[in-house]
Structures are given as structure tokens and as C-alpha cells.
Image (tube, rainbow, N blue to C red):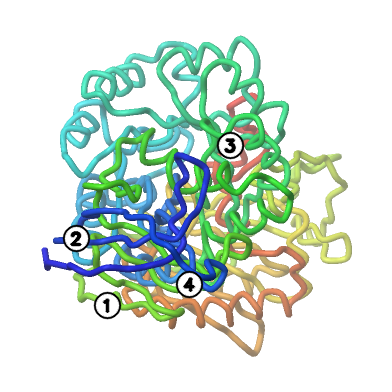
């Protein structure tokens, strides 16, 4: 590691003592040597120096960027570290996928802290590309780069003492590493049982009441604000009374959103709501380090020199970001360079035809329809009147009920078909090889021809997102596992912005149509979703017969 020794003067933000004062901070060999209060004639002229921000739960893959490119964008906003669950790539490439993320992350000055994916595959009701059993998970947990057991989405497995699930949790406990949770809507005694098994956090609370229920049983709550799931407004009030047990995260954040901002935006929004700034910074900077035992400095003497300089404690506009004493971002410009990689992937299906996605009418009086909800991962289950032409169920653009399909990307198989409401497309189709958690190809469109065109674009290049009409098409290739690009992060963000705009021009009113689309296959979030094996009821945890 390079040696970085220098001094910096500013308003030192002492989160521990809840005060800020002019000080000189000396850095030697990448560590904080001393913090010395100084006299300054006008402290209002000084910038503020504080610990760097931490995203306490994020899937790097959802940014469509490899870790090194994610870091390039994130440091501009004062983020110095992430707590990262690599289960997206693990569902495709298994252990090799996790190793890829670790290796790439090490190539840049940024503090990635990866978890051991706990649920690969996420369920038995979908086709994934890999599986990690309890022995695999323990092997990962023994690595120093693996800081925790990633979100335990199989909460029924915890409640019913599934042997494999409990072995994974036991391995984390044995090695002294925390276990992340994932239990949307779980309340009362079931929540207590889940938490008592050793689950320490949850980022899936939709309401303050649910979060308070979990807090009373000892769980820590991570407030999520991503590109699709947005729970900040519902939960931020918890920070007033529980500052030592709240953290911030993005969970899933698309590249255009990451260019715009990161955890710094949540801090600014919290200040605007009148919450004490030191409570906010405790959640954004301190709590993740303490909870996960991260090797991230907190501006104490002897700590790694991981800190940021901001103009004020209201907007949190970042002037500089330092990691291990190295200046990695300065006035909106990242100093992290791109690195070359050898992409890994698993993509083995053939092109499809319109016949493959024909949906025959079988006499249904009512059609089960997924209702997508903007800003939420949960969906509703609707029963609506079908439209039938020539014995086939078709999209109803007038009432915004469109065909949705999932194509198995790992081998040639029967295509799963259903219908979804609220995507709003009036023409064309959108498709993606990002479809949580198994990442088969998912698409929604107004006509079968458009759907086939959008899907085959992805199949031809083994991963990406597409938007098509009869006369136009946009496509963003994702050659790394069909999830991530190997190009410059800012260029990927520009390309994504263009394809997102095209989807909205076709009528979609969703704030992030591709992110919302990716969650329509996430079976562990209720209420109705579609996997490559069929329409799935997340409450009954079984397929819907049609």
C-alpha cells in the first residue's frame, strides 16, 4: 500500500461527542496520527471533516457495474465502504462468482465487505445456475474478505428449523460473524423466533409498525432507499429514538441513480426532516462499522484514514474523499481508474419464437394478474377479466394489463407466461437478464412479436437489457454474468439513462421500469411473482394453478 502522510484542517465532526470544532488532523502512513483542536477566526469558512459513508446492504451487481466501477462512482458521493451481498452473481456462477467480486474489488482503493450468500438458489421454485450448500457457505465464511452471512431470505426455513438453513446460521455464529435478515411482513412471535435464531438485521420493513416490532426483539433496522424499493419516508422517524440501531442502505441501485448520489442524499433528506445530524451520521458512518466489525476508520487516532470533506452538514456536498489516506475523489471527480477483467458468465439457451410464448385460453373466468407497485418490491394479486382473441390470451393495453414472460437462461425449456398491471407500455416491449434472484430472462410487452424481439436481443449476446418497438431498439449489453457491464461506469449510466427514457416514452410511468421488472421474478417477496417455472403465490408459497 502506498504511504500517505499529510495534514488537513477543517471543522472536525466528532460524532462520538456530538460536536464539531476546528481541528488539524495529521495522517501518516494512511492512518490518523492525531486530531488537535485549533483556534480559527471564523470556523464558518471551514469545510467539515467526518468519517466516510457506508452502504450497509447493497448488491453491487444491481448497479450493472463491476465492483471497481461501482467504487469509481460511489466515492464521488463520500462512500468509502459497502456491506455487499454477492448472491446475484452467486446464483449464476456459484463460488466462482463470489471470488470474481472479491478479486475485482481488491483492485481499487475502496473497502468492499462481502457476505457469504445464504440462499443460493433462493427457492426451489425457480431454475438457478448454481447452488451453495452449508459446507460451501462455511468455506466462504472462513475467508477474511467475507464479513457476514448474507440475508437469510428463507425465513420459513428458519421458522421450521430446516437443517441446511440452521447449519449456515450455526457456521456464522461459530466464526463470530453476524447474520443478515430478510423477512418482509414478519411480525410478533414469528418475528421473535426468526430473530432469536441469530438474525441481526432486516432491510425489508415496509412500515414503521413492522420495524418497531422487530426492534423490540433486538433486531437492527436498515433503512432502504434504492432505485425500486423506497422505504425512507416510512421509516426515517425511527432514527429519533433508535440512533444506535439504525443504518442506511440502497440494496439495489441502478447506475444513473448512483451517478446522482448515494448515502449522502439520505443524510441530507434526514436533516431536512429535522433529525439531529449526529444521529444521522451515527447511522450513516458509525453503526455499520460497529455491527459488522469492518476495517473502516472512524476518525479516531490510530484508525485508517477513511474520511470525507463536505461543504456543510445540511446538503452533504462532498468536496473530497480519502480511503487509507489516499485522495480518491475531489470536487466531483473520481480518481479511481478502470481495470481490465475477464468476464464470467453462464448462458445456455437458444432464441425463441412467437409460438413459444403463445398463451392459450383455458376457459378462465378470471385471470390472476400481478400488480406491480412503484417504489415497492411487493406486488398485489388481482383477479381480472381476460381478453381472448382466436383462443389466445392477449395483452390489454387499454387497461394496462400486459403479458409478462420468463425464459430459462440456463437451458432450453418451456417459457413461463402470465400478465402484469402497471407497467404502462402502449407499444413495444422491455426485457432483461437481470431478474432476481435466479436471473433468467424476464420481459413485458404489448405484443408477442415485440417480446420475442426484445428477448432474442439478450439471448444473442448472452445478457443485457433491451427496449424495442417495431422500428427502434436500444440495448445495453451485460457480459459479466448477464448482470454487469465491463465498461466505464459513467458510460454505462449514460446508456442506461437512454434505454430507461425509451421505456418511459413507450408509456411506462414507473420511476425505474427495468428495476421494477427485475423484481417481478423475486419469489421471496409477496404476493404474486413469475419464475421460469410458473406463476407463484408468495403467501401460500406455491404455484398458482391456471
Tell me: residue 146, above or below residue 185.
below
Q: Farthest residue in the bottom direction?
A: 471
Q: What distance separates the C-alpha of mark 2 from that of mark 4?
A: 50 Å
Please tell me whether mark 3 sits on a helix, a strand or a loop. Answer: loop
Residue 204, position as x, y percentages in the image: 58, 37
Q: Quadrant of residue 145?
A: top left
**What residue is shown with label 3?**
204
**Sequence order check: which comes first, mark 2 or mark 4?**
2
**Sequence order check: which comes first, mark 1 or mark 4?**
1
Relative horizontal placement of residue 28, taking residue 11 as reference (left or right): left
Q: Quadrant of residue 116?
A: top left
Q: Nearer the viewer, mark 2 or mark 1?
A: 2
Q: Are marks 3 and 4 in contact (CB under 8 Å)?
A: no
The numbered dot on residue 338 is 1
Q: Residue at x 76, y 39 (%)?
A: 381
Residue 50, position as x, y percentages in the image: 43, 56
Please tell me whether mark 4 sits on a helix, a strand or a loop. Answer: helix
Q: What distance separates the C-alpha of mark 2 from that of mark 3?
A: 37 Å
Relative horizontal placement of residue 64, taking residue 42 as reference (left or right): left
The numbered dot on residue 30 is 2
Q: Quadrant of the C terminus?
A: top right
Q: Residue at x 42, y 14 (%)?
A: 197
Amino acid at each position: 500500500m502506498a504511504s500517505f502522510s499529510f495534514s488537513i484542517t477543517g471543522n472536525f465532526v466528532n460524532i462520538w461527542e456530538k460536536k464539531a470544532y476546528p481541528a488539524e488532523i495529521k495522517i501518516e502512513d494512511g492512518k490518523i496520527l492525531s486530531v488537535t483542536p485549533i483556534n480559527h477566526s471564523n470556523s464558518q469558512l471551514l469545510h467539515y471533516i467526518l468519517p466516510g459513508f457506508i452502504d450497509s446492504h447493497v448488491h453491487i451487481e444491481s448497479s450493472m457495474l463491476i465492483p471497481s466501477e461501482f467504487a469509481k462512482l460511489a466515492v464521488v458521493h463520500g462512500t468509502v465502504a459497502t456491506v455487499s451481498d454477492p448472491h446475484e452473481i452467486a446464483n449464476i456462477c456459484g463460488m466462482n462468482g463470489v471470488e470474481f467480486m472479491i478479486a475485482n474489488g481488491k483492485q481499487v482503493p475502496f473497502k468492499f465487505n462481502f457476505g457469504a450468500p445464504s440462499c443460493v438458489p433462493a427457492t426451489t421454485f425457480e431454475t438457478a445456475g448454481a447452488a451453495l450448500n452449508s459446507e460451501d457457505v462455511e468455506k466462504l465464511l472462513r475467508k477474511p474478505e467475507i464479513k457476514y452471512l448474507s440475508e437469510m431470505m428463507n425465513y420459513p426455513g428458519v421458522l421450521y428449523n430446516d437443517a441446511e438453513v440452521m447449519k449456515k446460521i450455526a457456521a456464522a455464529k461459530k466464526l463470530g460473524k453476524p447474520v443478515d435478515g430478510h423477512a418482509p411482513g414478519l411480525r410478533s412471535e414469528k418475528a421473535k423466533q426468526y430473530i432469536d435464531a441469530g438474525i441481526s438485521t432486516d432491510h425489508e420493513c415496509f412500515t414503521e409498525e413492522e420495524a418497531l416490532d422487530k426492534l423490540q426483539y433486538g433486531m437492527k433496522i436498515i433503512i432502504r432507499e434504492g432505485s425500486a424499493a423506497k422505504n425512507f419516508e416510512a421509516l426515517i422517524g425511527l432514527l429519533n429514538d433508535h440512533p444506535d440501531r439504525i443504518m442506511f442502505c440502497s440494496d439495489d441501485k441502478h447506475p444513473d441513480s448512483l451517478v446522482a448520489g448515494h448515502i449522502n442524499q439520505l443524510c441530507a433528506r434526514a436533516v431536512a426532516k429535522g433529525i439531529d445530524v449526529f444521529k444521522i451520521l451515527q447511522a450513516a458512518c458509525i453503526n455499520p462499522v460497529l455491527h459488522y466489525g469492518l476495517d473502516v476508520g472512524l476518525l479516531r487516532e490510530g484508525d485508517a484514514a477513511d474520511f470525507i470533506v463536505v461543504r456543510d452538514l445540511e446538503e452533504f456536498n462532498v468536496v473530497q474523499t480519502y480511503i487509507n489516506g489516499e485522495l480518491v475523489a475531489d470536487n466531483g471527480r473520481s480518481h479511481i481508474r478502470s481495470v481490465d477483467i475477464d468476464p464470467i458468465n453462464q448462458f445456455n439457451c437458444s432464441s425463441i419464437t412467437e409460438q413459444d410464448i403463445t398463451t392459450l385460453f383455458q376457459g378462465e373466468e378470471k385471470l390472476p394478474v400481478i400488480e406491480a407497485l412503484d417504489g415497492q418490491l411487493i406486488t398485489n394479486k388481482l383477479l381480472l377479466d381476460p381478453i381472448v382473441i382466436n383462443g389466445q390470451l392477449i395483452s390489454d393495453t387499454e387497461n394496462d394489463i400486459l403479458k409478462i414472460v420468463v425464459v430459462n437462461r440456463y437451458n432450453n425449456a418451456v417459457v413461463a407466461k402470465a400478465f402484469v398491471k402497471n407497467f404502462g407500455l402502449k407499444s413495444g416491449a422491455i426485457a432483461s437478464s437481470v431478474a432476481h434472484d435466479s436471473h433468467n430472462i424476464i420481459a413485458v410487452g404489448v405484443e408477442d412479436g415485440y417480446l420475442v424481439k426484445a428477448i432474442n436481443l439478450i439471448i444473442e449476446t448472452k445478457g443485457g437489457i433491451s427496449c424495442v418497438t417495431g422500428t427502434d431498439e436500444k440495448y445495453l449489453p451485460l457480459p459479466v454474468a448477464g448482470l454487469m457491464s465491463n465498461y466505464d461506469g459513467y458510460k454505462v449510466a449514460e446508456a442506461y439513462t437512454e434505454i430507461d427514457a425509451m421505456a418511459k416514452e413507450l408509456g411506462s410511468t414507473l420511476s425505474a421500469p427495468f428495476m421494477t421488472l427485475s423484481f417481478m421474478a423475486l419469489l421471496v417477496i409477496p404476493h404474486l411473482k413469475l419464475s421460469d417455472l410458473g406463476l407463484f403465490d408468495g403467501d401460500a408459497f406455491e404455484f398458482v394453478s391456471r
